[in-house]
Image: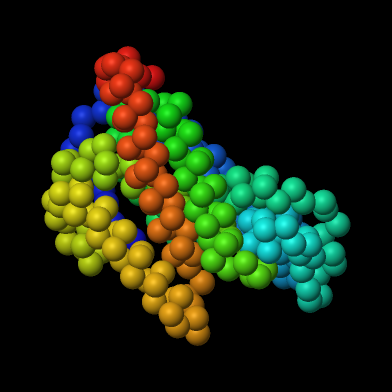
Amino acid sequence: MAGIPLSDDYPVRRVPTVTYALIAVNVAAYLLSPLSLLAVWYDAGDLPRQCAVEHYFLRWAAIPVELLGGAQVEGAGPCPAPGHTKVAWVSALTSMFMHGGALHLIGNMVYLFVFGPVVEDRLGRLRYLGLYLGSGLVATYAFALSQASAEVPLVGASGAISGVLGAYLLVQHRSRVVTLVLVIVPVRLPGWALVGTYFILQYFLYVSMSAYPGSDTGVAYAAHVYGFIAGALGALLMHRIRWRSGIRRSDVY
């Protein structure tokens, strides 16, 4: 991410219940997963825990080759076959609420906590939820198309949250955001500058990884880029529909 946002100065008019619910679901999904040390009901041994993590990703994460109609990936190594029947398109949804570690989760939730309430307030709760899920799905399938033969699981809310950032750029770019630059220096930045810098950085990294596959860092930059574009286009479409319908901001819930 292009800096760590702390707060946005836009005064939201109602409690952002959808954003808080999304954060709660993401946190709960991680804490209940075998990746969490709090999930003590999984076997304590190294190998059983490792196998539980592998089965968790194979069952619920989005795997490009599966999404594009390939055979179900069964895994390899010392772990037994997971023995589940997977519905590929469902994994495109569930993968949005999975994270590979605590830092991955925290980084995503910080951005959702800062920018989500603003977009939810401007679009309305149902439209915002639709934009979040829709952007996440676009990001997941776009990544799958860019890595059609990959069997590596894709997890994380980054694609959906990138969609929220794309929508923010359209609906409330004039806000100022207190941001930690270089992790320690708080700076008030225009919202458009922070979000625009994020997109440029993700696009540059996506193009770089595409041009030099050997430098792949394991981050799905394609999902970030296409999720952002999907969110921006979705927000633009929603605003045009509202304008043509004569709907006032105060009428949207």
Q: Residue at x 51, y 72 (%)?
A: 218
Figure check: 188 above or below 77: above
**Percent coordinates x, y for residue 71 in the rendering:** 79, 62
| Depth order, front residue of 252/10 | 252
Q: Quadrant of the C terminus?
A: top left
Residue 172 lies left or right of residue 226; in this view the side is: left
Residue at figure coordinates x 57%, y 62% from the top left = 145
Counting labels gives 0
Residue 4 lies, in percent from the top left, at 28, 56
Which residue sits at x=23%, y=67%?
A: 182
Residue 33 drawn at (x, y percent)? 64, 52
Which residue is nearer to you in this view: 68 or 228?
68
Q: Is residue 76 left or right of residue 10?
A: right
Which quarter of the figure is the N terminus placed in? Answer: bottom left
Q: Is residue 61 above or below residue 233?
A: below
Q: Looking at the image, what colour scheme do you see? A: rainbow
Q: Nearer the viewer, residue 109 or 248?
A: 248
Residue 13 visible (yes or no): yes
Image-quadrant location for residue 179: bottom left
Tell me, yes or no, if residue 52 can be seen here: no
- Give the percent coordinates (x, y) of residue 194: 23, 54
| Left-right relation of 149 to 77 | left
In the current view of this chain or complex, which residue is farthest to the front?
244
